[in-house]
Image (cartoon, helix red, strand yellow):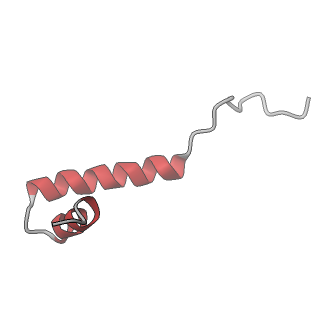
């Protein structure tokens, strides 16, 4: 009985969740502000082929 009783059976990858959240926020910001640096960054990442 060494296991922590508060530990859940499913591990949540918080680092991936945070990265995805930041990426979505950057996409939303880029859509709202098309001349911001985020716009060109998202465009570069999401659309590598012109």
1 or 19, which lies in front? 19
The answer to whether 8 appears left or right of 16 in the picture is: right
Seen in the picture, residue 31 relative to 11 is either above or below; the reply is: below
Q: Is 16 left or right of 47, judged from the image as shown? A: right
Q: Position of residue 49 (x, y in %)?
A: 21, 65
Report the residue that reaches farthest toward the right.
1
Identify the image quadrant of residue 45: bottom left
Q: In which quadrant is the N terminus drawn?
A: top right
Horizontal placement of 27 versus 23: left or right?
Answer: left
Tell me residue 41's x, y (percent): 24, 68
Choose between 44 and 20: the one closer to the eye: 44
Give the quadrant of the C terminus. bottom left
Instruction: Give above or below for 43 relative to 31.
Output: below
- Residue 49 vertical position relative to residue 29 in the rendered view, above or below: below
Q: Eyeballing the image, is 23 above or below 4? A: below
Q: Residue at x 42, y 54 (%)?
A: 19
Which residue occupies the foreground of this view, 49 or 15?
49
Please tell me which residue is depicted at 63% across the width and 38% down the height of the picture.
11
Residue depicted at 26% across the width and 59% down the height: 46
* Side of 46 where 29 appears, left or right: left
Number of marks in the rendered image: 0
Quarter-wise, where is residue 35 in the image?
bottom left
In the picture, residue 23 is in which quadrant? Answer: bottom left
Residue at x 53% of width, y 47% of height = 14
Q: Nearer the viewer, residue 41 or 50?
A: 50
């Amino acid at each position: 009985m060494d296991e922590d009783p508060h530990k859940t059976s499913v591990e949540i990858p918080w680092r991936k969740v945070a990265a995805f959240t930041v990426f979505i926020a950057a996409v939303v910001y880029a859509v709202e502000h098309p001349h911001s640096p985020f716009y060109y960054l998202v465009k570069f990442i999401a659309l590598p082929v012109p």
